[in-house]
């Protein structure tokens, strides 16, 4: 015996924990379907369209949500029937359709943005340092998965052209720098979804 606990390794245990958390988030989305009985995908589409308020093409939603064109097409059709999403010809390219939220869709997106109580309580159970460590860890994992194209590139700091990791080694609390707002920040402020994100070049690679 080498003194190690038997069974799965810590990283394998972590993967099980992340899977359980993913299941809890998905279950919470079903419970939070609201008055128009949104599916989790329909809810994700509303939140995506609410992200920066710009009209979006259906293809952008397919990419951002790592879904398929027929699945997103069905969900958009349902959201249009529920009068939560508006479909208009894209003024920049009249061959394509641009999607925006209706006022009711915006209200639903606002409702969805509020974290349900059980998830809020679970997050509140974490200390500041736990949140920073988990953000650092999930950000690193997401970056690797994006490099392998296992998940779509999202608007995270680590794929952003404004991100300067460890630009302030003299400040362990706020070692990174955001060139967009020209300010240092710490692991606890890493963004996994940022409206000011602009992709680094080449895609998926932030400046060192
Ligand atoms: S603009 Fe947003 S995503 Fe980009 S580095 Fe700044 S905070 Fe991060």
Image: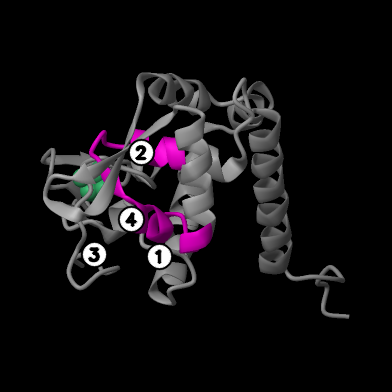
The residue at 44%/77% (across/down) is 148
Earlier residue among tags 4 and 3: 4
Earlier residue among tags 1 and 2: 2
Residue highlighted by disc 1? 143
In this view, the mark in front (4 or 3): 4
Label 3 and label 1: CA atoms lie apart by 10 Å
In this view, the mark in front (1 or 2): 2
Label 4 and label 1: CA atoms lie apart by 20 Å
Tag 4 secondary structure: helix
45 in relation to 85, above or below: below
In magenta, the rendered stretch is 45-70
Query: Residue placed farthest to the bottom in the image?
Result: 1
Q: Is residue 148 magenta?
A: no
Which of the labelled discs sits on residue 49, or is there none? 2
Residue highlighted by disc 3? 206
Q: How is the image coloured?
A: one colour
Is the residue under label 3 in contact with that under label 2 (CB below 8 Å)?
no
Residue highlighted by disc 4? 60
Residue closer to the observer: 72 or 148: 72
What is the x, y in percent for residue 127?
Answer: 56, 32
Relative to 156, 167 lies left or right: left
Label 4 and label 3: CA atoms lie apart by 21 Å
């Amino acid at each position: 015996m080498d003194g190690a606990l038997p069974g799965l390794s810590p990283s394998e245990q972590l993967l099980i924990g992340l899977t359980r958390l993913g299941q809890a988030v998905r279950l919470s989305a079903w419970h939070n379907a609201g008055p128009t009985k949104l599916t989790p995908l329909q809810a994700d589409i509303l939140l995506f369209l609410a992200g920066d308020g710009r009209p979006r093409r259906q293809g952008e939603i397919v990419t951002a949500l790592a879904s398929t064109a027929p699945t997103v097409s069905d969900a958009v059709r349902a959201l249009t029937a529920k009068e939560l999403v508006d479909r208009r010809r894209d003024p920049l390219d009249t061959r394509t359709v641009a999607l925006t939220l209706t006022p009711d869709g915006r209200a639903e997106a606002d409702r969805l943005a509020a974290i349900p109580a059980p998830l809020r309580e679970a997050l509140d159970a974490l200390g500041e340092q736990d949140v920073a460590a988990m953000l650092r860890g999930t950000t690193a994992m997401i970056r690797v998965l994006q490099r392998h194209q296992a998940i779509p590139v999202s608007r995270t700091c680590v794929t952003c052209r404004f991100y300067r990791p460890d630009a302030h080694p003299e400040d362990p609390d706020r070692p990174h720098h955001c060139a967009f707002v020209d300010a240092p920040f710490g692991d606890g402020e890493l963004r996994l979804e940022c409206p000011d994100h602009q992709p680094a070049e080449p895609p998926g690679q932030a400046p060192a």
